[in-house]
Image (spheres, helix red, strand yellow):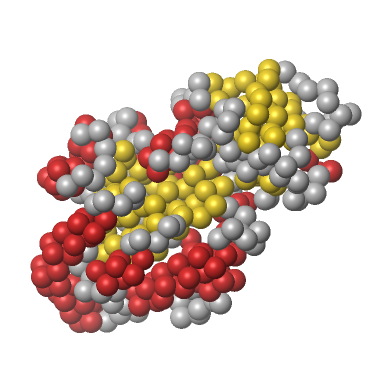
Amino acid sequence: MSQSLLDLPSQSNRFAEIILTNARLVLADGVLDGTVVIRDGIIAEIDEGFSRTPSAIDLVGDFLIPGIIDLHTDNLERQSEPRPGARWPSRSALLAHDAQCAAAAVTTVFDALCLGDLGLDDGDRVRTFREGVANLEALAGSRLLKAGHFLHLRCELPAADMPDLLESVADHALVRMASLMDHTPGVGQYADVERYRSRRARGGMAVTEIDTHIARLQEQRGKLRASNRRFMLNRLHCLPIVLASHDDETVEEVAENHADGIRVSEFPVRLEAALAAHGLGMDVIAGAPNLVRGGSHSGNVSAAEMLTAGAVDALASDYVPPSLLEAVFRLAAGDVPVHEAVALVTANPARIAGLSDRGRIAPGLRADLAAVHTEHGLAAPMAVWRGGRRIS
């Protein structure tokens, strides 16, 4: 008699043979009712049909998908400061962030940490960056962390301290991705200056203070953006790091980025920018929360519109790890085949990041997997394995 998920301990023996059966296997080219055999943390066999092996784990017809790969999440920042001004112990924050990722079926996470102080809350972001790097370095490889973690450097181009911060971490082994950020009011995500003013006013800033802050940032951008951009590109050019632009707004911006060797456009804020990037062969990453919420929280182009236009290659959680799975199965409930929707958070991010050992259910790849139950229009991970070890 096969076993139920409820009968299993939370930590399975990585090196034992594990058989997952009676599952809807989401493969690269479709869905197969079948069985996966795991040996030594690697997918060894994929078989059609139900396994009668007594030790097989019955997934009762749930989907079995590859573990999700999240190329950009700011969630560690939110765990480090769960309320404004309330800092949480940094290692506890990392463990909470990691647990949330694992529970959301994210087995590989790129922690997007901010390099550069633009004022207001950015000083705390720099602190989170420094502590995050130190903590990931200390805890990498330990069983305290459930998911696999890499670093995604969010480099604020107009920030005076960005070059020194980048220099301190550029050669770190965990750095796999870096994005060129510019959060100056009047461009990119904050192109609508009035919307930016309203947001700061809701945070309690006086009108005169907001205007002074905006003028300072715009002046600072004029002085530093170009030189900092060139420093960043030159410093990272020869390293095995994926370079991404961020919040692309115009066709001209996209062309400049492509000419400089940038091959990923994440969270473009205008449809024409997404289409231009896609037309140049760049990979376009959209925000899963944008899709789940039905639009951008900043008033920019919707992820649904970009998907309809065929200009999205991958989704990232941005600030809500569970949004990835929800976005996938919302798409699958519409007119997107489930294997194509799942690829947006698994196979495609793996390809973009150069992770050839994961992202698909195929023999020889890592057994990073998630059993997903769907009901009442919702999708929930029932069990998650990373390298054959049960992590959630």
Q: Is residue 87 above or below residue 138?
A: below
Q: Quadrant of residue 294?
A: top left
Residue 14 is drawn in which quadrant? Answer: top right
Give the image location of residue 9, x and y in percent: 80, 49
Q: Is residue 127 left or right of residue 94?
A: left
Looking at this view, is 227 or 101 the one in front?
227
Report if residue 201 is visible in the image.
no
Say which residue appears at 46% left-offset and 55% top-offset.
150
- Quarter occupied by residue 58: top right
Residue located 39% across and 72% down the image: 125
Residue furthest right in the image: 1
Residue 234 shows up from this direction:
yes
On the image, the x and y values in percent for residue 283 come to: 31, 38
Location of residue 204 with respect to 363 vertically, above or below: below
Left or right: where 139 falls relative to 71: right
Where is the N terminus found, in terms of image quarters? Answer: top right
- Residue 199 x %, y %: 32, 68
Which residue is at the far top?
48
Q: Is residue 99 above or below residue 158?
A: above
